[in-house]
Image: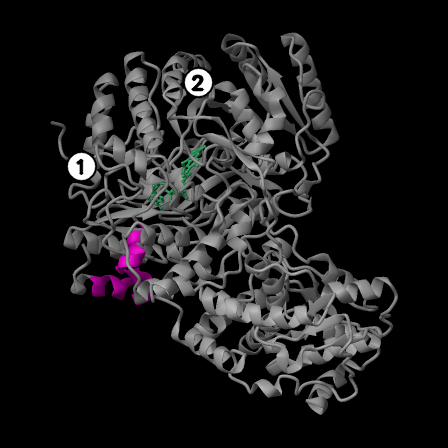
Amino acid sequence: MALLSEKCKWIPQVQIKSQKYATACPSIDIYNYHPYSGGGRIILALLLETGRIEPSEELREIVYKCTECGSCAVSCKFLNTLEPLEIIMKLREKLVELGGGPMPKQQEYIEAANKVNNPYNEPHEKRLAWLPKDIRLDPDAKVLYFVGCTSSYRRQEMAIAAARILKAAGIPFNILQDEEFCCGSPILRTGDVKTFKKFLNKNLDVIESKGIDTVIFSCAGCYDTFKVDYPLYREYTFRVLHTVEFFDELLDTGKLKLIKEIPITVTYHDPCHLGRNAERYKDWDGDIVNLMPLVSINIPPKPKRTGSNGIYEPPRNILKKIPGLKFVEMERIKEYAYCCGAGAGVKSAFPEFALQTAKIRIEEAEDTGADTLVSACPFCSTNLQDGIEESGANLKYYDISELILMSLGLEPEKLKEITKEVV
Amino acid sequence: MVLEKEILKKFQDIVGSKNVNDGEVITNAYSYNWCMEYVNYMEDKEPIPFSPIPKAVILPSSTEEVQEVVKLCNKYRIQFKAQSTGLGPWNQPSTENSIILDLRRMNKIIKIDDKNLYAVVEPYVSGAQLQVEAMKYDLTVHMPGAGPQVSPLASATSMNGPGFTSPHTGHSARNVLGVEWVLPNGEVLKLGSAGLKNHSDWYNGDGPGPSLRGIMRGWAGAKSGIGVFTKVAVKLFPYPCSTEFKLQGYSPNYNFDIPDFMRLYVMDCGSYKYLKKVILRIEEEEISFMCSHLSGYGLTAIFSHSVESMMDKMPIASLKTPLVVLIAARTKYEFNYKQKVMEILLDELNLKNIIGTKYTPNSIFYAEALRSNLGLHGFIVTGGFQSAKGQCDTVKTCLRTTKKSIPLKKKYIKKGVIGNDFGEGVWMTSYESGHYFHVESITLFDQTDEESVKGMGEFMEDNYQFDLVKHLGAPFFVEGDRMHNMFGPYMMNYHKWLRKIKKAFDPNEIADSGFYISAKSEN
Ligand SMILES: Cc1cc2nc3c(=O)[nH]c(=O)nc-3n(C[C@H](O)[C@H](O)[C@H](O)COP(=O)(O)OP(=O)(O)OC[C@H]3O[C@@H](n4cnc5c(N)ncnc54)[C@H](O)[C@@H]3O)c2cc1C
C-alpha cells in the first residue's frame, strides 16, 4: 500500500478555484468519517483483506454509501498510480462474494431485473410504450438506438427527444424493442458481477446477431457500461456512441440545423458515466523492468485511466451552437465534475444521500448565474430534478437532447406537453 | 477497547450521536496511517501500518464542543489525539485508551484581513482553500512541502513548517500569529492579541510576558501532545505574480498559461562548498520565490508525473549539486530587475542556467510551484518516502550533514532496502533571505515490502545516532519519550524542560503524548 495522501477528498489541487467548491467526494462531504473517502475505502479493503475486520452491517453501509463517481481516482492519479475506484468496485465484489452485500433495496432491483429485464420492475413488453407513433423503426438499419431502462420507463422525454432528433436528421435506426435488456450497470456497480454478466451476454448476443455498425445511447450509464465494462468481459466489434457525440457529428455535417433561438443561460453537468468514467481501458502488453532495487518501470509506459478521455467537448459544442443560448461553466467540470449523487445504486438504497448530493450540485449550478441546468444522463436528470424541487432552486432542468429538439424548431413550452401526448 | 455505553452517551450529548463513532469498522480504519509501519518497527513492534485502535472517533464542530469533549476525557481519564487532515503517523493514538478528535467539521475561514495581511482559520481549512480565497486579494499563504491539501492550522501550531516557497512565504513556526488553544484540561487560552479584553484581534501572537508560541510548538510542534488548537491566524504574503490562473487540457496533462513575469533557473554548483556560496549570495539579494537544493534525482521527480517520465530527464538527473531558483514578479519593472540581478549573479558566480537550453519543463511545473504541490512528487518513484534529519540551521551545517551522511545512506542503498539516490537525496531550502536553512534527507522506500520497511527504520535510527555523535543538528522527527531521552543529554537536557512544560499543562496526561513527551520523569 502506498501513500494515501488525502488528495482524493479534493478536486485536483491546481483546479481549486474557491473554498466552497474545492471538494471532490460526495460521500466524505456528507458522512465525514475518513473511511467514506477514496483513501479510506482503500483502507477498508486492506482491513478486510488482512482479516482485521469481517463483513458486517456497519461495513456494508459504508461501502455502499458511495456513488462510484470516480472523482477520487482522478485526483489521486494526478500524481499517483493507485486505483481507488477499482478498489472500491472490487471491495463490493468481495462483499457480495462473502454474502455481505449488496444493500436490500439493490437486491430488490437486481431481482426485478432478473424477472422482467429492468430494475424498475416494469413489464418488459411495455419497454417501447414511449415511442411516438410517427417514428418509424428500420429493422435493416445499421444504427441501433439502445434506449436503456431509465429512459424507457422513467425519463421517456429523453427517449422521445433522441428518436425525434434522429428522425429530423433522416437517420434510419432501429430499437431492439423486447430484445433490449437492462445493460447491467446498476447491477455491476453493486458488485454482483455474476448477474451482470448474464445481462451483458444477453445484450451482446442480440446486437451481434443483427449486423449492427453503431449503437447509440442517450443514457450515460448504459453507454459507459457498454463502452468500458463490457470489453473487460467480452469483446465486440460495433461502434458505441453517446447521443451527444452522434448529434454533434450530425450538426457538424449539416444533417441537423439548429435554427430556433433559445434565450436561456445554461450550465452543463458532466455525468460521471459520460465524463471521467467513459474512458476505455487500453491494452498494455509491455514489460515491468526492474531498474534497481525497489524501482521498476513499465516499458512502454502503462496507460493510466485519468479521466482525460471522457466525452466533454461534444455536449459543450452542441450547447454553443444553439442560437441565443448563453453557456456558463460551473467550477467543478469535466474530469473533476462533482457527482449528481445518484449512481452505483445510491439513489435506491440511500435516497437521502442522493438528494443531499444533488442539492450541493444544484447550488453550484445556481452560483454560475444560469437559469437552466442541462445534462445528458437519465439518472442525473431524475436526481438533479429532485434536488431542484427539494431545494426550491430557481433553475429549470433539461436533457441536452430536449434543447436540441427545441432549437430544431419546437416551442420550448410545448416540449413537456409533447411528452404527455405521445406516452 | 470500546467506550463504556454511559461515556459514549455523554460524548454523543456534546457533539450529536452521528458525530461519535465507536464502531469496529470506523475505529479500525482510523488505526491505519502512512509510515506507521516503520514507526512501529522502530519502537520494537510488528512493522504493520496500524497503530492502537482508537476507542472512538469524535467529530466536534466548535471550540466549545472541543472543550466539552476534552473535559469529559479528563473526567474519565481517556486520552485524546487531535487530527486536522490526519496525514502521517503523528496522528495516531499511542495507547488503547485514546480517542481521536477528527476536526474536519471545523472548516471555516473566519477572516481574511487583506490590509493587515493575515487570515484566521479553523483546523480543516486546507492550504489550497485558503490560498484561492487569499488570491482574490492578490495574496497567498505559506504551505508546507506536504502539499496544498494539508492544514495551515496544523502546520502553524503543531508540526514542522518548511515549504517550497519558503524564501517568499517563510516557515510555519514564524508565521503563526494569534491562536485559540483548548488546553489539556479543557480551558481555552488565546495567545497574543487574540486574548485582549478590549479590541481583541489576531495580528500578534505574543502578549505581555514570555511568549507562549515557543512553548506551544517550538521548531517541530507538540503533535497534539499539549492540547487542541481550534483557530489560528497565519500571515499572508503578496501573491508573487498575476493571480490569473489558467489551465487547459485534462488531468494530469494540464497546460498552464505561465504568468508573464516568471522565470526558472536550475544551475549546477558542482560541489557542496560552492553551493553554499551560491545560495547565500542569491538569497542575499532577496529576489527568489523558491530557492531549493535538491539532488539531481530529486529534481527530476519534481518535473515528472510518473517514474517512467523521469527517464527522459537525464540531463537533470546527472547534475551534481543543483540549485533551483524561481523568480516571479507582478510588474515588468520588478521582473526586469530580478532577471538582471540573476544575470549578474550567474556571471559573477560563473554559472549557467540549464532551463531553456538543456531542459524545458512542462508548463504544469509552474502551476504546481505556485500552488505548493511539488512535495508530493517524492512518491512517484517507490510509492513511499520519509525524511531523515530535518534540522533548522546554517547552510554550512545543513550541507555538512548532507555530505557526511552520504556513506551511511549508501550502506543502506547497497543492502537494497532504500531507493538509490547515490546517497545525495536531500531537500534544502532557505528562509528569511538566507538567515537560516532547513535540510531533510528524503529517503525512498517501499511500504509494501517488509525488508524495505525494516531497512528504513534502521536507517532512520542510525541517522539519529550519527547526527548526535557528529553533532549534525536536531532532526524534526525527534518524537516520543525514547527519542527525547536520547537527544536531550546531548542538547542542554532540553528534554527535562520539555517534560516540565508537559507536566504544567497536562499533569494527567490527557493529551496523547506518543509523538511528544510524557510528563513522567525520565528514568
Ligand atoms: C508526504 C508528506 C510530506 C511532508 N512534507 C512536509 C514538509 O515539506 N514540510 C512540513 O512542514 N511538513 C511536512 N510533512 C508533515 C506535515 O507537517 C504535516 O503533514 C502537515 O503540515 C500538517 O498538516 P495536516 O493537516 O496534515 O496535519 P495533521 O496530519 O492532521 O496533524 C499533524 C500533527 O499535528 C497534530 N494536530 C493536527 N491538528 C491539530 C490541532 N488542531 N490541535 C492539536 N494538534 C493537532 C496531529 O495530532 C499530528 O500530530 C509532510 C507530511 C507528509 C505526509
Q: Position of residue B306 (x, y in %)?
A: 56, 36
Where B72 sits versus B388, above or below?
below
The residue sitting at 69% across, 57% down in the picture is: A312
| Quarter of the rendering occupied by the C terminus of chain A | bottom right
Q: Is residue A274 at all visible to an observer of this figure? A: yes
Q: Which chain is indicated by disc 2?
A: B
Mark 1 closeness class: few <14, some 14–19, many ≥20 residues within 10 Å: some
The residue sitting at 15% across, 44% down in the picture is: B508
The residue at which mark 2 appears reads as B423
From the image, give the main secondary structure of the stretch colored magenta: helix
Q: Position of residue B337 (x, y in %)?
A: 70, 22
The residue sitting at 43% across, 22% down in the picture is: B439
SS for tag 1? helix
Mark 1 to mark 2: distance in Å?
A: 41 Å
Q: Is residue B523 left or right of residue B393?
A: left
Q: Is residue A297 left or right of residue A260?
A: left
Q: Is residue B283 at all visible to an observer of this figure? A: no
Write down the region rendered in magenta.
B8-30
Which amino acid lies under the numbered mark 1 shown in the image of this protein?
Lys
* Residue located farthest toward the left when viewing the structure as drawn: B523
Q: Are marks 1 and 2 on the same chain?
A: yes
Query: Earlier along the polypeptide chain: callout 1 or callout 2?
Result: 2
| Quarter of the rendering occupied by the N terminus of chain A | top left
* Tag in front: 1 or 2: 2
The residue at which mark 1 appears reads as B503
